[in-house]
Image (spheres, helix red, strand yellow):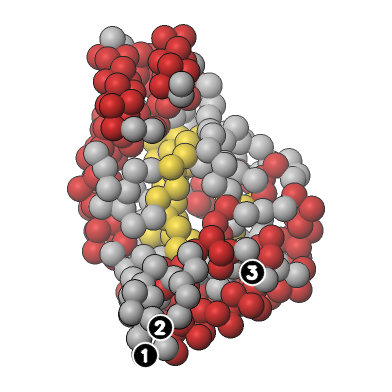
Amino acid sequence: MGTTKASLYWLVSTMLVLLGYRRRAVKKLQQEGFVTVFKCHNTRGHVLKKFILWAKRHGFTFISQQDVLDFIDGKTEQFPPGSVWLTFDDGWKENTTEVFPVLQELRVPGTVFLATRSVERGFFWFDITKHPANAPFRQIGRFEYEKQSNAIREKLISELVQNPKVTVPHNAMSEADVKRWKDCPYIFFENHTNNHVVMSKCTDDEIKEEIRQASQKIEKWTSKKSRILCYPIGYFDKNKVSLLEECLISIALTTVENRWTPTKSLPDRYFIPRMAFPDYGPTTMAINSLCAVSIENVGVFKFVKRLLKR
C-alpha cells in the first residue's frame, strides 16, 4: 500500500473511532466470549504500557497461560469477558529491559516462547541472515533459508557463523536472563522449538526432537514443565497433532490472525489464532488491532478497503 493510500486508510480508521465504532467494538468483544491472543516480538515498553493501561481502563482482563491451561484441563469453564493474553515470540534480549519491567510493574502476565538454542548461542538464525554485508559470497534472503530442509538450513547457518566476514548480531536473551526472571509471577517461558525450525521442512523425528529438547532446557532453566508450543514462523500441519501430544504439548499457537473462540476439543486447541501487536507503535494501532474485527465489519470501512486495493 502506497503512502497516500495508507494515510487515507488510517484517516478513515481514526474517523470511525471518533464516531464511536471502537466503543461499540469494545462492548461487543466483551459480550461474545472471545479471547484476544496478541503476538508480540521485540516490543517497545512505552507502547506496551500505554496499551495495557488503556485496556484495563476499558474493562479488558489480562489472563495468563495458567488460566488457559486450567481451561483446557477442565478446571474452569470460561474466561472473564474481554480476556486478553499477551504472548512474546522468540526470546528477544530487549524483552528483559522493555517488556518484563512493564509486566511486573502493572502486574500483567505474559508468555515468552523461547527458541532455546538461540538463548544458548545469543543470536537467532533468521537474524544473522540479514547481516552478511561484507561476506564474499552470494547472499540469499531469509525466505530462501526457510525453503531448505532443516539439516541443510543448519549447515548454511553454521557456515555463516564461522565466516569472519559476517557480523553476528546478539539479539537473543541469555540463559542468565531466563533464570533471572523465572520466579517473577508475571513472566512465563514456553516452547518455540530448540532451533526455531520451519516445521514443514522437518521430519516427524526432527519435530519431536526439537520440541523435546526445548522442553527439557526450559524445565532445566525454570524448574517448570512446558506444555504450550508456538509454531515457529507460523508453519503448522494439522496432520502432526499426534506428534505434539507425544511431546506432552497441550495447546499450540499459530500466526493466523483472528480471535480465539475458546474450545477444549481436538484438534482445535492446537491451532489457536493470534492478533499481531505493533511492536514499535503507535499505541493507537494496538488498540485498533484489539478492536479490528468489529471495526472492519463496518460497511463504509469495507468500501474504503476495496477502494484502496484498486
Crowd class of label 3 (few under 14; some 14 to 19; many from 20; radius 10 Å): some
Residue placed at 44% from the left, 90% from the top?
A: 162
Say whether residue 230 is visible. no
Secondary structure of residue under mark 3:
loop
The quadrant holding residue 84 is: top left
C-alpha distance separating marks 1 and 3:
24 Å
From the top left corner, tell me how far across and down residue 52 is, in percent. Answer: 29, 40
Label 2 or label 1, whichever comes before in sequence order: 2
> How far is disc 3 from disc 2 in space, using C-alphas?
21 Å
Q: Which residue is drawn at 75% across and 49% down?
A: 238
The residue shown at (51%, 42%) is 274
Local crowd size for mark 1, using a 10 Å CA cut-off: few (<14), some (14–19), many (≥20): few
| Position above or below: 305 against 231 | above
Q: Name the kind of residue labelled 2 in the image.
A: Pro
Residues 208 and 102: in front is 208
Residue 284 visible in rendering: yes
Amino acid on which disc 3 is placed = Gln
Q: Position of residue 73 (x, y in %)?
A: 66, 49
Q: Which of marks 3 and 2 is in front?
A: 2
In the picture, the disc for residue 148 is 3
The image shows residue 41, relative to residue 7, as above or below, that is below
What is the secondary structure assignment of the residue under circle 1? loop
Residue on which the image places disc 1: 164
Q: In the rendered image, which residue does mark 2 sit on?
A: 136
